[in-house]
Amino acid sequence: MTSKRRFGARRLLFFAVTVCVAHRVLAGPIDLPGSLPNLFGVGLGTTTEYAGGNERIVGGLPGLRYTTASGHLLEWYGPYAQFDAGSGTGFEWGPAASLRLGRHDVDDPVVSKIHTIPTTVEGGGFIGYEYIHRGTVPYRLRGELTVTTNAGAVFTGSRLSLNGSAWLPLSPRIFTGVGLGASWASGGFNNTYFGVTSEDSMRSGLPYYSPASGVEQITSWLACVYQIDRSWYAGALVFYQRLTGPAGDSPIVVQRGTRNQLTFGAGAAYAFR
């Protein structure tokens, strides 16, 4: 991918990459069914060029799901990674990190005149709970709260994401999953990614806008994973994001883009044990 292609935590190209195709999510917005083995995969997907935009890009990223000998789960889905220091089922907790790509050299002739945003690394942690039902019709439920910040390197404040998912096997080889989520962002985050400064306004013609903190987005997704054979899996995902609150009211979104963001993709992964 070229450097101009920005993915928020919401960007699900990483999910397409991990086969569960497929931000923030994720261990964040998206995850994989708990019964899968260790996997390494790559995938291809399409999403918008930046949060709130309507120009589309295509790209690919790697992903990894690995359970240690002691039962701790490492999940790395494109720009997002987390390590579960818990027991593997039940309560989950541990560190989380994500790479948030910047916004620069965008195709939109107006947004290209707004302040650029450098790529940054976010760090934080998560806590959640996983329930696995092993009855006649097995299923898996998972909920997580993730908090990340970049300590003021690019934006001030933090971001909180609450996500839930459910996975159900349709057959011994086919898994289907659905997810819902929401993210809250600080005023510092929203000003960086959705604000229009006085200088931006003079250059671009968009009105000055200084958003406060608030719910940034509501998300939902639908995914399917197919086991080709003992070692190979394939999957596909559709991920929908609705920008809300101060983020959704930004002139960058309302005048030059759209609140409705759609990501979809497909990928393949190799299972190792």
Image (tube, helix red, strand yellow):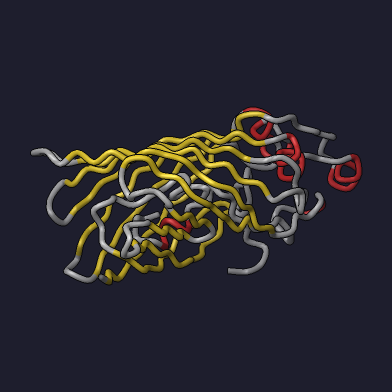
In the displayed structure, does residue 157 sit left or right of residue 241?
right
In the figure, residue 121 lies in which quadrant?
Answer: bottom right
Q: Position of residue 253 (x, y in %)?
A: 67, 38
State the residue at coordinates (75%, 39%). Answer: 188
- Quarter of the image where the N terminus is located: bottom right
- The quarter of the rendered structure image containing the C terminus is bottom left
Q: Is residue 227 left or right of residue 115?
A: left
**Which is nearer the eye, 220 or 80?**
80
Q: Position of residue 72 (x, y in %)?
A: 37, 57
Residue located at (51% from left, 34% from top):
182
Q: Residue at x 84, y 46 (%)?
A: 204
Instruction: Measuring from the top left, give residue 21's x and y in whole percent.
Output: 36, 55
**Displayed quadrant of residue 221:** top left
**Residue closer to the observer: 202 or 224:** 224
> Residue 202 location in percent, x, y?
91, 43
Who's the residue at 83% across and 34% down the image? 207
